[in-house]
């Protein structure tokens, strides 16, 4: 079974028009998963509340990674900018 990664983070919004809602992945997870990255992406199955989806951890450009939060997940889980949420994921 794949190792679960669990963390709590604040929901942020990229500042450009149409920017994504996201949570920053803890640096210790980023460092641990770096060898698994393909072109900077790590394929994961993410879970927030009762919602799960297949996605990738994405590079921020400064060596860190983030997890984008799709609109359908935010709506179902009633998540807004500034909320602190628990996120879990496993590498696919």
Image: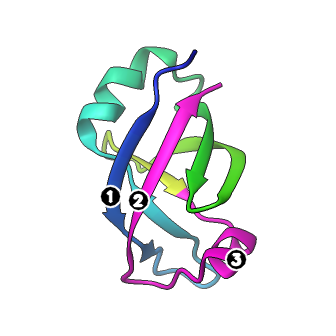
In primary-sequence order, the first of circles 2 and 1 is: 1
Quarter of the image for residue 5 reads top left
- In this picture the colour scheme is rainbow
Report x, y in % for residue 69: 59, 64
Q: Identify the residue at horizontal 55%, vertical 31% (top origin).
A: 90
Instruction: Residue 86: say if magenta.
Output: yes
Q: Identify the residue at horizontal 67%, vertical 59% (top origin).
A: 51
Q: Considering only vertical position in the picture, is 65 above or below 33?
A: below
What residue did someone put label 1 on?
8
**Alpha-carbon span between mark 1 and mark 3:** 18 Å
Report x, y in % for residue 42: 56, 30
Q: Secondary structure at mark 2?
A: strand
Specify few, some or many for label 3: CA neighbours under 10 Å numbering under 14, 14-19, or 20 or more: few
Asked whether disc 1 touches disc 3, contact meaning CB atoms under 8 Å apart, the reply is no
What residue did someone put label 2 on?
86
Left-right relation of 72 to 68 = right
Left-right relation of 85 to 67 = left
Q: The N terminus is located in which quarter?
A: top right
Residues 8 and 14: in front is 8
What residue did someone put label 3 on?
76
**Alpha-carbon span between mark 2 and mark 3:** 15 Å
Q: Identify the residue at horizontal 58%, vertical 76% (top origin).
A: 19
Q: Which residues are magenta?
A: 68-92
Residues 36 and 17: in front is 36
Report x, y in % for residue 53: 72, 49
Q: Secondary structure at mark 3?
A: helix
């Amino acid at each position: 079974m794949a190792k679960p990664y669990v963390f709590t983070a604040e929901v942020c919004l990229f500042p450009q028009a149409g920017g994504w809602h996201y949570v920053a992945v803890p640096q210790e997870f980023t460092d641990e998963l770096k060898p698994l990255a393909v072109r900077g992406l790590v394929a994961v199955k993410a879970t927030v509340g009762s919602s799960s989806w297949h996605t990738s951890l994405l590079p921020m450009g400064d060596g860190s990674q983030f997890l984008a939060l799709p609109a359908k997940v935010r709506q179902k889980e009633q998540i807004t900018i500034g909320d602190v949420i628990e996120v879990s994921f496993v590498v696919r």
